[in-house]
Image (cartoon, rainbow, N blue to C red):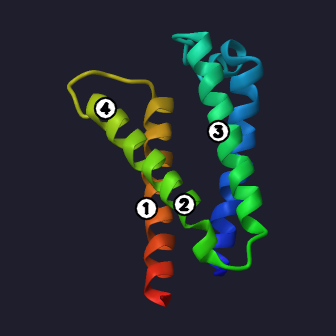
Amino acid sequence: MSRLLKITFIINAILGILVGLPLLLVPGRFLGLFGWAPVEPLLDRLLGAAFLAFAWMSFRSLRLNNPQQALPIIEGELAFCFLGSLGFGRHLFQPVWYPPMVWVVFFALAGGALLWLVNLILIYRKK
């Protein structure tokens, strides 16, 4: 497994825990820290659970010897980040003001999509 892929899995696991745990346990307080009012606590908690699940998958994938075995996880992460950034971008590139935190999430998702895509391309090039 390449060093870049290992680093990507580590970053994903850390961010998944740091964002997922507070969203699952205390979504209102956590989002309030960023001036982002929770819209729907049940969906916020579900998103937290999803982030924790992605963190767990990244942790498990780190232990694999063959990056081919991690392809479904990498593709799933790529799909989540890409589609999430598309969804956010659909709203952000309108003539409406959004708080800076929304832009941070958008760029984190877009950057994640790019990072997962690079990892995917590197794996397919080695085939």
| Along the viewing direction, whichever of 52 and 28 lies nearer the viewer | 52
Q: Which mark is residue 72?
A: 2
Confirm or deny contact between disc 2 and disc 1 (CB under 8 A).
Answer: no
Q: Position of residue 75 (x, y in %)?
A: 48, 59
Per the image, the residue denoted by label 1 is: 114
Give the distance between the C-alpha atoms of the residues marked 4 and 2, in whole angstroms.
30 Å
Q: Position of residue 112 (x, y in %)?
A: 50, 55
Confirm or deny contact between disc 3 and disc 4 (CB under 8 A).
Answer: no
Give the distance between the C-alpha atoms of the residues marked 2 and 3, in whole angstroms.
16 Å
> Label 4 crowding class (10 Å Cα cut-off): few <14, some 14-19, many 20+?
some
Q: Which mark is residue 51?
A: 3
Residue at image point 74% right, 27% down:
22
Of marks 4 and 1, which one's residue comes earlier in the chain?
4
Q: Residue furthest left?
A: 95
Under tag 2, what secondary structure?
helix
Direction from residue 71 to residue 65 in the image, left or right: right
Disc 1 residue type (three-letter): Leu
Question: Image quadrant of residue 45?
Answer: top right
Q: Position of residue 125 (x, y in %)?
A: 44, 86
Of marks 3 and 4, which one's residue comes earlier in the chain?
3
Q: Position of residue 28 (x, y in %)?
A: 67, 13
Disc 3 residue type (three-letter): Phe
Direction from residue 51 to residue 117 in the image, left or right: left
Give the distance between the C-alpha atoms of the residues marked 4 and 1, in whole angstroms.
19 Å
Per the image, the residue denoted by label 4 is: 92
Q: Residue furthest bottom?
A: 126
Quarter of the image with the N terminus is bottom right
Residue at image point 71% right, 48% down:
55
Disc 4 residue type (three-letter): Leu
Confirm or deny contact between disc 2 and disc 3 (CB under 8 A).
Answer: no
- Is residue 35 among the parts visible in the rendering? no
